[in-house]
Amino acid sequence: MGNRLPAILIAIGVLLFIAYSSVFVVNERQQAIVIRFGQIQDVKSEPGLYFKLPFGFMDADSVQYIQDQALRFDLDDIRVQVSGGKFYEVDAFVVYKITDARRFRETVSGDRESAESRLRTRLDSALRRVYGLRGFESALSEERASMMREVRGELTNDASNLGLTISDVRIRRTDLTQEVSQQTFDRMKAERLAEAELIRARGNEAGQRRRAIADRQVVEFIAAAQRDSEILRGEGEGERSRVFAEAFSQDPAFFDFYRSMSAYREAMGASDTTLVLSPQSEFFRYFEDAAGTKPAASTATGTTTGTATTPATAN
């Protein structure tokens, strides 16, 4: 019995190893592909405990686990050209799921990186085509959703051939490239400067127009004021003449005397006034006769025309 115990333990160990090698577990986030001698034997997509032939290391049955959940890969800094000829940088991502594990194994040997590499190439091409048919503004408008559906439609066939299903395609970022950013900035700056010049020109035009209107109104106001003043002055002169005429008609002698006195005041008002007149001049007829009826006195000979220098001091 003692000699048989080690053999029994070895047999038990071998049985346990065979049992362990014949069992595999699939959880809710996995799919399992059973491969026998390099060929796909079965695909297990439901979670649970399953059995297979043991000794997978002898290429009998082996299990390859495939993820059964939504997966994502990103594509960054894609340089795309829009319809206007300018270039932009785009970041996008794709959400997909492995829905056909058998085909996934047959096409890319179940290698997720190989599948994503193929999809990246196709995504790059689809984004370039979709952006190339539109302007940059489309990616920032309501048309963006239709652009993404169009890109997803172009990826669907390729993804299906790989055993994948595309759930969604999204654009994370759409930016101007460095050179386009500078060009856009320069263009916007030029537009703002042109707009400022236009506003300034319109302001100058409006200012000149208003100044011209104001100058014309000033001229009109001054002309109207001068016209009114001339009218009033003429009316005043007329009234003055009328008053003088009435006064003259009432007492012509006094009026004549008053006018002579006013003339003397005007002529000899300054202290250095010099008059060169004949003594018999009508201007001096009130000097010797208050009534103004007798002519001024003659010189010694009575006929000589003299020069009178009269200080303008007399009242």
Image (cartoon, rainbow, N blue to C red):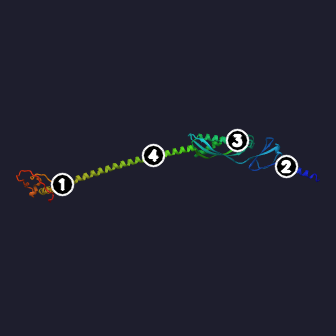
Residue at image location 62% in from the left, 40% down from the top: 128
Specify whether 291 is left or right of 180: left
Which residue carries the number 4 mark?
197
Quarter holding the C terminus is bottom left
Q: Which residue is mark 3?
A: 160
> 103 and 188: which one is in front?
188
Q: Secondary structure at mark 4?
A: helix
Callout 1, which amino acid? Arg
Of mark 3 and mark 2, the one earlier in the sequence is 2
- Work out how far the residue at label 1 is from the one at label 4, CA to CA, in angstroms: 66 Å
Q: Position of residue 205 (x, y in %)?
A: 40, 46
Q: Are marks 3 and 4 in contact (CB under 8 Å)?
A: no
Nearest to the eye among marks 3 and 4: give it: 4
* Earlier-in-chain disc, 1 versus 4: 4
Q: CA distance from mark 3 to mark 2?
A: 40 Å
How far apart marks 4 and 2 lie (CA) works out to 89 Å
The residue that appears at 52% across and 44% down in the rendered structure is 186
Q: Secondary structure at mark 1?
A: helix
Q: Is residue 265 above or below residue 124?
A: below
Q: Nearer the viewer, residue 151 or 310?
A: 310
